[in-house]
Image (cartoon, rainbow, N blue to C red):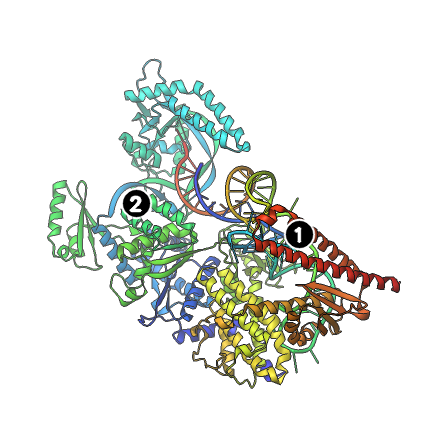
RNA sequence: GGGCGAUUAGCUCAGUUGGUUAGAGCGCAACGUUGACAUCGUUGAGGUCACAGAUUCGAGUUCUGUAUCGCCCACCA
C-alpha cells in the first residue's frame, strides 16, 4: 500500500469533518451575499420555520431543495442570497409557552399579565431559534446568517406597522361584527384555516317550541332538531321554507337526475332517499305549508326556558326535506343562521363569554360551560315535555388546530383587511405570468381561493405578535365623532402623514399611528383613546417577508438589488395562506411581485401514505438521519426522492439502540412508549415514553432505510476519489489534445459533457430527482465501473499513465462540482484533498484559483467533447464485455481462470474493438483470439449474440454442455417467437402502408438481425448436441 | 358536494411528442475479497403496467367509464 492509501481513510468521517467545514466556509464569508452590480442577483427567502417547532423531514426537504438552487447559482456566478429567519407563529408559540406555564407552574397567562408573558415567550424564542438555526447549519444550508431575521424583530415590526398604516389609509382596514371561530381554550378567534373537522358521537334532539296564539287548526308547537341544544338559548327565530312544495319538487328532481348519472352502487341509497321524500309529502308537507303561511302572517313562538318571544320566519335556508323541515335560527353562533338573520332582520344574541361559559343572555344558565348547559337544558326541557325524539348521530365538529378543543362559532368585533382589489392584483400576477407556479396545476387552487375575495380577518386575541396599531374612542353621538375627526385632521402629526383617523358609524373613531413611539400616541391616550389589544395574524407579517427582510419600507440598496426575489420553494399546504398573501402584499407595498417563480415540492408521507406528524408518532427527525447517515446522505436521499408528480412515501424504522438492527415502524408499535426488539429482545423507548420505567430504556432513533442509497453513493464517491488520489502521485499536468486521446478517454469526457448539460437542465427545471439520478449513474456506472476499471491497466503503462491521471483528476474535479449543490460536505472534503496534488486539473493546463469548491465555477458542457459516435461505439464494447461476463457467470468459471473468445462482426466493429482488447482481459478475464469474420466454431462453443455481434467463447473442459443446450433452446424459442411476431407485423398491409417509413425500416432491420441470430443459435446447438452425444 | 393527484417487479419509484424484448434502487438467489470501495463487484430470477371499453397499423403512454387510495376546498338543523 502506498503512503497515501494509508493516509486517506476508506470512510468519510462526517461526524468530525462536517462541522469544521461548515465553520470554515462561514468564517471565509462563503455564504455572504452583497449588493454587487457586476453580478446578477439570485435570491431565495426561506419559508421561515415556526420558531417553537423542531425541524422535521419536510423542512429538511424544503431547505435541501433551496440550498441546491442557491449553491448552484452561486457557482454559476450569481450573487446568491439565501435569506434566513424564523416566524413568531403567534398562536402556536403562545400556546406552547402557556401550556408549559400551566404544567410547570400551574399558572395562566392572566396570572402573569401581558408584559411578563410576552417576556417569557421571547426567552423561549431565543432558545428555540438557536436550536432551529443550528439544525439548518448542520444540514449544510448556505444561508447568509448575517442577515437573519425574525418576523417579530424591529425591522419586520416597522414593515408591519407601515403596511398596516398604509392599508388603513386606503380604507382597506375595517372593523366589523362577524362570526369567528372562537377557540374557548386559547380565548381567541382562529381563522378557517386553523380549524379541522373531526367526527364525534353525538345526538340529534328534537325540540318543541310553543306557538303563541295559534289559529284554530294550526299546530300548537313547532318542532326543530339540533345537535347542540344549548344554543337554543340564543335562538331568535325558527325558519320554515317559504314554498316547501316547490322546494321538495326541486330536491326530487335533482335526486332523480343524480340517479341517472351515478354509479350502480350508489343507486340504492338514492332510491331510499326518494322513497323517504315521497313519504314526507304525506307526513310533513301539509303542516309545512301551514307553517309557511303562519310565518307570512307574522306568527310568533315562545322560546322555552327563557320565555323569549321569537319570530317564525320564511327563509329558503330551511330545507323541507331535512329533519322536521323547520330550523332554529341562532344568528350569533352559526354562520348560516347569521345569513338568515341578515336577510330577515332578526336580532342577534350572543350567549357566550370569551372563556366558553354562558353569559347573562342565557338567563339561569349563566356561568355554566357549554357542556354542562347542554345537559341542563335537555333536563329542563324534558321536564316541560318539550323534547321529542332523540337520535344517535355522528357529528362532524369543528376543532381548533392549535388547542384541539371544539370551536364555538361566535359573533365578535374583528379587524379585517378588505381583499377585493388586493386579491385581484395577486390573481393577475399569476394569470399574466409575472409569477409562475410550478407545477402549474397548483395555480388553480391559488386562483380559486383568491377569487372568493373573502375579507381577511387579521385580529387575534393574543399577546404574542404585532399589536394592532389602532387607538379607539367611542363618542356620545355622530356629531361628536365627526367633530373629533375634524380635530384630528388638523393635528401636525396628521399633516406630516404620521397619523390617520377613520369614523366607524355611528360614533366610534379609530386612529392609526404610523411610527412606533411617536409622541402623538401619548397625546391620544391622554385624550381618552385606548389601543386595540389584539395582535395581527401571523400571516400578516409573513406576507411581508420577501421585502421586509430586505429593509422595506426604506429604499435600501438590498431591496433595489435583490427584490423581486427569484424563487420561492415551499410546500403546497400554504399556497393560499402564505404565497398568495405575499404576492398581494408585495404588489401593494413595493409595486412588484415578491418572486418570479414558486416551486411546490412533494410532501413526505410515511410507509402507509399518511402525513408524518408528531401526534401520530410517525415522524422522522432529520437530526437522527444526520447522526446515522450524515448530512450529505440526508440531502442526496431527499433530492433523489423529490420527483415531480409523486409525494414521497417513506417507510420508517426504529433503530434498536442495543443491537442496531432495524425495526419496522407499524401503526401498532408507533404508539407504544416501549418496544421489544425482535432481534435482541431488549426494550427500547420511543417519543411516547413519559413514565420513569419507560424512560429508563434508551430511546431508539427513527430513520428510514430509504437513505441507504444516498449513504452508499457517498461512500462510493469517496472511495473512487481515494483511488484517483492514490494514483496521482507524481502527477504532472499538461495540455491535452482531446481528439488524440484513446477511445475510453474521449468516451468519459463525452459522457461528462452530456451529463453536465443534462444535470444543469434538470436543476433548472426543478427536476431534482432527475438531477440526482443523472450524476449518480454517471459517477457509479460510467466513471467507477468503466473508466476507473480501465484506468487500472493504463496506469501501469508508462505510455498512458500521464494522460490517464489527468483525465481521472479532471473528471473527478468536474464530478465534484456537479455534486456540490447536493452533497456539499463530502465533495468539499475531497476537493480539498485533491488540491494537494496541484491546482491544475483542467485539460488545458489552467490552474484552479478558488480555494473552496463551493465557490468554484459550475462546469459548462464542452460541446467538442460530446461525441455521439464514440458513445455509440463504446456501448458496443460494453455489450461484448457483458456477453463475456454473462457466459462466465452462467458457466460458473473460477474468476481467475482465463478464457478465450472470438467476436464475429463487421469490419467497422473490428477496428473499433481492436484497441479495447486489453480491457476484455482486465475486466472479464478473457483473451481475444480474433475479431472479424471467418472463425470456425470451437468444439464447445458458448455463444451470445448482442448488437449483431457473435461473441463465442471456447470454454474447453469447463463447459456445462447440458446447461448451454438448455439455454440455447430457450433462446431459440424466444427468437423464433419474435421472428414470427415481426413477420406478421411486416406482412400486415396496414402497418407497412400507414406506419412511418423509418419505423418500418427499423422493423425490417431487426427482423434480419433476428434471423441471423436464429441461424447461429441453430449452428451452435448442432455443435453442442454432437458433443453431448459423443461424451455419452 | 367541488377540485387535484396517484395506481408499473416483494418494497419505494422512473418511464419524454404513442414505435424493437417496460427500467432503476432496495430486497431475493448464485458466485466472488491482499492494492479505491462488502456501505463493494459480476451475474441472474422477478411485471397481464388497477380494471373495462374506445381511438390507432401499433397504447404503460391518448380518450371515456369503473374501482381503490391520498390531498385540498366547501357544506352538513
Residue A264: image quadrant is top right
Residue at 66%, 75% (x, y): give it. A914
- Residue A929 image offset from top left, x and y in percent: 73, 74
Give the left or right position of residue A893, taking residue A766 as reference: right
Residue at 31%, 32% (x, y): give it. A340
Residue at 85%, 62% (x, y): give it. A1026
Q: Earlier in the sequence, mark 2 or mark 1?
A: 2
Asked whether residue A178 appears in the rendered view, the answer is yes
Asked whether residue A646 appears in the rendered view, the answer is no
In the picture, which quadrant includes the N terminus of chain A?
Answer: bottom right
- Residue A787 image offset from top left, x and y in percent: 60, 73
The residue beneath circle 1 is A982
The residue beneath circle 2 is A455
| Mark in the foreground, 2 or 1 | 1
Above or below A680: residue A953: below
Above or below A430: residue A16: below
Give the left or right position of residue A270, taking residue A385 as reference: right
Q: Label 2: state its secondary structure.
A: loop
- Residue A179 image offset from top left, x and y in percent: 32, 40
Towards the viewer: A223 or A457 = A457
Q: Residues within 10 Å of mark 2 (few under 14, many from 20)?
A: some
Towards the viewer: A158 or A460 = A158
- Residue A706 image offset from top left, x and y in percent: 56, 60
Q: Label 1: state its secondary structure.
A: helix
Amino acid at each position: 500500500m502506498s503512503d497515501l492509501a494509508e493516509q486517506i481513510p476508506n470512510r468519510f468521517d462526517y461526524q468530525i469533518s462536517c462541522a469544521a467545514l461548515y465553520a470554515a466556509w462561514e468564517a471565509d464569508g462563503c455564504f455572504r451575499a452583497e449588493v454587487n452590480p457586476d453580478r446578477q442577483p439570485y435570491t431565495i427567502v426561506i419559508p421561515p420555520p415556526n420558531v417553537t417547532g423542531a425541524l422535521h423531514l419536510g423542512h429538511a426537504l424544503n431547505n435541501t431543495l433551496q440550498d441546491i438552487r442557491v449553491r448552484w447559482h452561486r457557482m454559476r456566478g450569481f450573487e446568491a442570497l439565501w435569506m434566513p429567519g424564523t416566524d413568531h407563529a403567534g398562536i402556536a408559540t403562545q400556546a406552547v409557552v402557556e401550556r408549559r406555564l400551566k404544567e410547570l407552574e400551574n399558572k395562566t397567562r392572566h396570572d402573569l399579565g401581558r408584559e411578563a408573558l410576552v417576556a417569557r415567550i421571547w426567552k423561549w424564542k431565543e432558545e428555540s431559534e438557536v436550536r432551529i438555526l443550528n439544525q439548518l447549519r448542520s444540514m449544510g444550508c448556505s444561508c447568509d446568517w448575517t442577515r437573519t431575521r425574525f418576523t417579530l424583530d424591529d425591522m419586520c415590526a416597522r414593515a408591519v406597522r407601515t403596511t398596516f398604516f398604509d392599508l388603513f389609509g386606503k380604507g382597506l382596514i375595517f372593523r366589523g361584527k362577524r362570526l369567528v371561530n372562537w377557540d374557548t381554550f386559547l380565548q381567541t378567534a382562529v381563522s378557517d384555516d386553523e380549524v379541522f373537522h373531526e367526527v364525534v358521537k353525538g345526538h340529534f334532539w328534537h325540540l318543541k317550541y310553543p306557538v303563541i296564539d295559534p289559529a284554530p287548526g294550526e299546530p300548537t308547537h313547532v318542532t326543530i332538531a339540533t345537535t347542540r341544544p344549548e344554543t337554543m338559548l340564543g335562538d331568535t327565530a325558527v325558519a320554515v321554507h317559504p314554498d316547501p312544495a316547490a322546494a321538495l319538487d326541486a330536491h326530487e328532481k335533482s335526486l332523480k337526475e343524480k340517479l341517472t348519472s351515478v354509479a350502480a352502487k350508489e343507486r340504492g341509497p338514492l332510491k331510499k332517499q326518494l322513497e323517504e321524500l315521497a313519504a314526507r309529502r304525506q307526513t310533513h308537507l301539509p303542516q309545512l305549508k301551514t307553517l309557511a303561511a303562519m310565518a307570512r302572517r307574522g306568527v310568533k313562538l315562545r322560546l322555552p326556558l327563557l320565555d323569549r318571544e321569537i319570530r317564525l320566519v320564511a327563509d329558503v335556508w330551511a330545507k323541507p326535506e331535512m329533519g322536521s323541515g323547520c330550523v332554529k335560527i341562532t344568528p350569533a353562533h352559526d354562520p348560516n343562521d347569521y345569513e338568515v338573520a341578515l336577510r330577515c332582520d332578526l336580532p342577534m344574541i350572543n350567549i357566550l363569554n370569551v372563556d366558553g361559559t354562558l353569559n347573562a343572555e342565557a338567563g339561569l344558565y349563566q356561568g355554566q360551560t357549554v357542556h354542562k348547559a347542554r345537559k341542563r337544558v335537555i333536563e329542563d326541557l324534558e321536564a316541560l315535555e318539550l323534547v321529542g325524539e332523540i337520535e344517535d348521530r355522528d357529528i362532524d365538529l369543528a376543532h381548533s388546530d392549535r388547542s384541539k378543543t371544539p370551536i364555538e362559532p361566535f359573533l365578535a368585533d374583528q379587524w379585517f383587511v378588505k381583499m377585493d382589489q388586493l386579491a385581484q392584483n395577486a390573481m393577475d400576477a399569476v394569470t399574466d405570468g409575472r409569477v409562475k407556479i410550478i407545477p402549474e396545476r397548483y395555480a388553480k387552487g391559488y386562483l380559486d381561493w383568491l377569487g372568493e375575495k373573502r375579507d381577511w380577518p387579521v385580529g387575534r386575541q393574543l399577546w404574542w405578535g404585532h399589536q394592532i396599531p389602532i387607538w379607539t374612542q367611542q363618542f356620545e353621538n355622530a356629531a361628536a365623532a365627526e367633530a373629533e375627526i375634524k380635530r384630528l385632521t388638523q393635528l401636525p402629526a396628521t399633516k406630516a402623514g404620521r397619523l390617520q383617523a377613520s369614523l366607524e358609524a355611528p360614533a366610534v373613531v379609530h386612529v392609526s399611528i404610523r411610527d412606533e413611539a411617536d409622541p402623538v400616541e401619548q397625546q391620544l391616550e391622554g385624550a381618552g383613546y385606548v389601543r386595540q389589544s389584539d395582535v395581527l395574524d401571523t400571516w400578516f407579517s409573513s406576507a411581508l417577508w420577501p421585502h421586509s427582510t430586505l429593509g422595506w419600507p426604506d429604499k435600501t440598496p438590498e431591496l433595489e438589488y435583490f427584490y423581486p426575489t427569484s424563487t420561492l420553494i415551499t410546500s403546497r399546504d400554504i399556497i393560499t395562506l402564505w404565497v398568495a398573501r405575499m404576492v398581494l402584499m408585495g404588489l401593494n407595498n413595493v409595486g412588484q411581485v415578491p418572486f418570479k417563480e414558486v416551486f411546490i415540492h412533494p410532501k413526505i408521507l410515511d410507509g402507509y401514505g399518511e402525513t408524518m406528524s408528531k401526534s401520530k408518532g410517525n415522524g422522522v427527525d432529520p437530526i437522527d438521519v444526520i447522526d446515522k447517515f450524515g448530512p450529505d446522505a440526508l440531502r442526496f436521499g431527499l433530492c433523489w426522492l423529490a420527483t415531480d408528480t409523486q409525494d414521497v412515501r417513506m417507510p420508517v424504522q426504529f433503530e434498536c439502540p442495543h443491537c442496531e438492527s432495524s425495526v419496522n415502524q407499524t401503526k401498532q408499535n408507533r404508539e407504544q412508549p416501549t418496544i421489544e426488539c425482535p432481534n435482541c429482545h431488549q426494550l427500547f423507548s420511543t417519543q411516547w415514553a413519559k413514565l420513569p420505567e419507560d424512560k429508563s430504556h434508551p430511546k431508539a432513533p427513527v430513520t428510514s432505510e430509504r437513505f441507504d442509497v444516498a449513504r452508499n453513493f457517498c461512500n462510493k464517491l469517496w472511495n473512487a476519489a481515494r483511488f484517483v488520489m492514490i494514483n496521482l502521485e507524481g502527477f504532472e499536468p499538461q495540455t491535452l489534445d482531446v481528439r488524440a486521446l484513446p477511445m475510453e478517454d474521449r468516451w468519459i469526457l463525452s459522457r461528462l459533457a452530456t451529463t453536465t448539460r443534462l444535470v444543469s437542465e434538470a436543476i433548472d427545471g426543478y427536476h431534482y430527482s432527475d438531477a440526482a439520478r443523472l450524476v449518480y449513474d454517471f459517477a457509479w456506472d460510467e466513471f467507477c465501473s468503466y473508466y476507473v476499471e480501465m484506468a487500472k491497466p493504463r496506469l501501469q503503462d508508462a505510455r498512458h499513465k500521464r494522460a490517464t491521471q489527468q483525465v481521472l483528476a479532471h473528471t473527478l474535479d468536474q464530478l465534484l462540482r456537479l455534486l456540490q449543490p447536493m452533497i456539499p460536505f463530502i465533495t468539499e472534503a475531497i476537493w480539498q484533498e485533491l488540491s494537494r496534488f496541484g491546482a491544475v486539473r483542467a485539460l488545458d493546463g489552467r490552474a484552479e484559483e478558488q480555494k473552496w469548491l463551493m465557490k468554484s465555477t459550475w462546469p459548462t458542457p464542452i460541446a467538442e467533447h460530446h461525441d455521439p459516435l464514440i458513445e455509440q461505439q463504446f456501448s458496443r464494447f460494453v455489450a461484448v464485455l457483458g456477453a463475456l461476463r454473462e457466459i462466465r457467470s452462467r458457466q460458473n468459471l473460477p474468476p481467475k481462470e482465463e478464457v478465450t473468445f472470438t467476436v464475429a462482426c463487421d469490419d467497422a466493429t473490428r477496428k473499433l474493438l481492436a484497441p479495447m482488447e486489453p480491457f476484455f482481459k482486465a475486466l472479464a478475464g478473457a483473451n481475444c483470439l480474433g475479431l472479424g469474420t471467418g472463425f470456425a466454431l470451437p468444439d464447445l462453443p458458448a455463444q451470445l449474440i448482442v448488437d449483431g455481434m457473435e461473441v463465442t467463447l471456447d470454454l474447453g473442459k469447463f463447459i456445462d454442455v447440458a446447461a448451454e443446450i438448455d439455454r440455447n433452446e430457450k433462446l431459440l424459442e424466444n427468437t423464433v417467437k419474435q421472428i414470427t411476431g415481426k413477420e406478421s407485423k411486416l406482412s400486415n398491409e396496414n402497418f407497412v402502408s400507414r406506419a412511418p417509413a423509418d419505423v418500418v425500416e427499423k422493423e425490417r432491420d431487426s427482423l434480419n438481425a433476428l434471423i441471423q441470430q436464429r441461424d447461429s443459435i441453430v449452428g451452435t446447438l448442432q455443435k453442442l448436441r454432437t458433443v453431448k452425444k459423443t461424451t455419452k
